Image (cartoon, grey):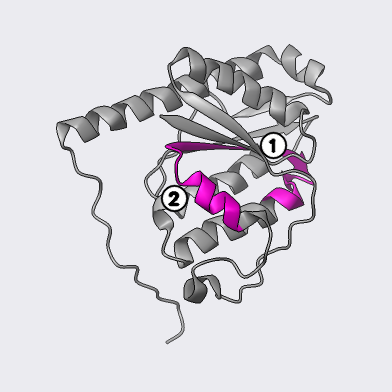
Amino acid sequence: MKVLLINGSPHKQGCTYTALQEIAATLEEEGIGSEIYQIGSESIAPCRACYACGKIGRCVINDRVNEFIEYAKDFDGFIIGSPVHYASACGGAVAFLDRAFFAAFASGRGEVFLHKPGAAIVSARRAGTTATFDQLNKYFTITQMPIISGRYWNMVHGATPEQVKQDLEGMQNMRILARNMAWHLKCREAADKAGVPMPKVEETVYTNFIR
């Protein structure tokens, strides 16, 4: 079993990375593999709402998003981390995740994320964490992904990696989150072995409020 830890920060080894590393170490203790995927600082175009992905089976924008969708299918769970920028997730991560989740669903590859557990963590110097945490969790709720929690909102505080490590409560919660993720994955593995079926998937119904 493997968990993909998505680092949405433009800084490869900054505060968000520090929190993800704590999660990775705890997952390893629990016998769960993990890997940190760096979205990076390169320019990521936002979704064009062209719906071409539903016709051609991939996002029409030629960058790493399509590669990511293919890569992500081999992972059993996901933890998305982002720093707080203006009380929300950083722009590059939002553009990347919007397109990855939508294109996976619209292109008929919803199984990349469907029913796999997800969790969000956020990093900030001071404030904006709960708004960002709520924003990231919405990727999971629209994709039928069980949300894994810690014992508090999954956040760390600090302006540098060294300061994040001094946030003892925040770092403890990263470890608790990792153990809860590991437990869920082991429960799902046990359910698979016991023959417990996954939830029935219905054909999507679309409505709006125009009469």
In this rendering, position of residue 114 left or right of residue 99:
left
Quarter where residue 40 is shown:
top right
Could you tell which of marks 2 and 1 lies nearer the N-terminus?
A: 2
Instruction: Please tell me how many numbered marks the rendered image carries.
Output: 2
| Residue 26 % position (x, y) | 53, 16
Most distant residue in the bottom direction: 211
Q: Image point 54% across, 44% down: which residue?
A: 137
Residue 3's place in the image compared with 209, above or below, is above
| Amino acid type shown at disc 1 | Thr
In this rendering, position of residue 118 left or right of residue 81:
left
In this orientation, does residue 161 appear?
Answer: yes
| Amino acid type shown at disc 2 | Val
The residue segment tinted magenta is 66-93
**Crowd around label 2: few <14 · some 14–19 · many ≥20 (10 Å):** many
What residue sits right under mark 2 in the picture? Answer: 112
- Which marked residue is nearer to the observer: mark 2 or mark 1? 2
**Crowd around label 1: few <14 · some 14–19 · many ≥20 (10 Å):** many
Q: Image point 57% across, 16% down: which residue?
A: 25
Q: Nearer the viewer, residue 133 or 82?
A: 82
| Residue 111 % position (x, y) | 39, 52
Name the mark on residue 129: 1
In this orientation, does residue 150 appear?
Answer: no
| Residue 56 % position (x, y) | 51, 74
Residue 157 in magenta?
A: no
